[in-house]
Image: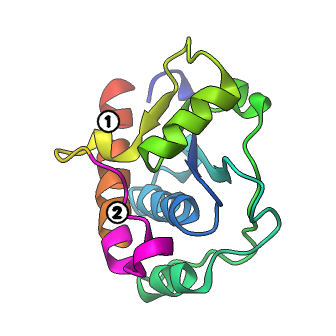
Amino acid sequence: MKNNKITKVLFVCLGNICRSPMAEFVMKDIVEKAGLSHEFEIASAATSTYEIGNPVYPPARQKLAEHGICCAGKTARQITKKDYEHYDYIVAMDQSNLRNLRAMLGDDKQGKISLLMDYTSRPADVADPWYTGDFQATWDDVNEGCSDLLTFIMDKNK
């Protein structure tokens, strides 16, 4: 990467207990396996206050564990305006969270806010397991989105 700059990525969903922590830890795993951990700072946050302080939802934790990914110690937190200044990429899981982010953070003058699945060949919302119970569909979306996001970042930073 150019300038040895750390790329900072923040994943965001409504409660920060399912989709965004799954994306955070999947991205950390992908980056680690690529030998790039030293080039990234990766975290996740919520747009709401509903789950602040709560751990990753057990079925999401289980889905990560099935793939050898540990998310121990992660608790939900809400995004702040300071996060906009700190992170290079603020990646929402769906259109609703994208709208919430724009309302909370104001005009995205630096073009930091995006949707995870927009980095893939099939733009859509990341499947929400809170309502469907289908954590496999969420895993599939998150895994594809994070892989393609990493490719995008690496290509951009060449």
How many discs appear? 2
**Is residue 17 left or right of 144 when viewed as pictured?**
right
Disc 1 from disc 2: Cα separation: 14 Å
Magenta highlight on residue 7: no
Magenta highlight on residue 128: yes
- Seen at 65% across and 20% down, the residue is 106
- Give whichever of 156, 74 is nearer the camera: 74
Q: Give the position of the C terminus as an image quadrant.
A: top left
Callout 1 amino acid: Phe
The region drawn magenta spans 124-138
Within-10-Å neighbours for mark 2: few <14, some 14–19, many 20+: some
- Give whichever of 82, 149 is nearer the camera: 82
- Seen at 31% across and 72% down, the residue is 137
**Is residue 50 left or right of 47 when viewed as pictured?**
right
- Give whichever of 73, 41 is nearer the camera: 73
Asked if 63 appears above or below 131 in the picture, the reply is: below
Asked if 86 appears above or below 136 in the picture, the reply is: above
Q: Nearer the viewer, mark 1 or mark 2?
A: 2
Residue designated by label 2: 143
Q: Which residue is most to the left?
A: 121
Within-10-Å neighbours for mark 1: few <14, some 14–19, many 20+: few
Residue designated by label 1: 152
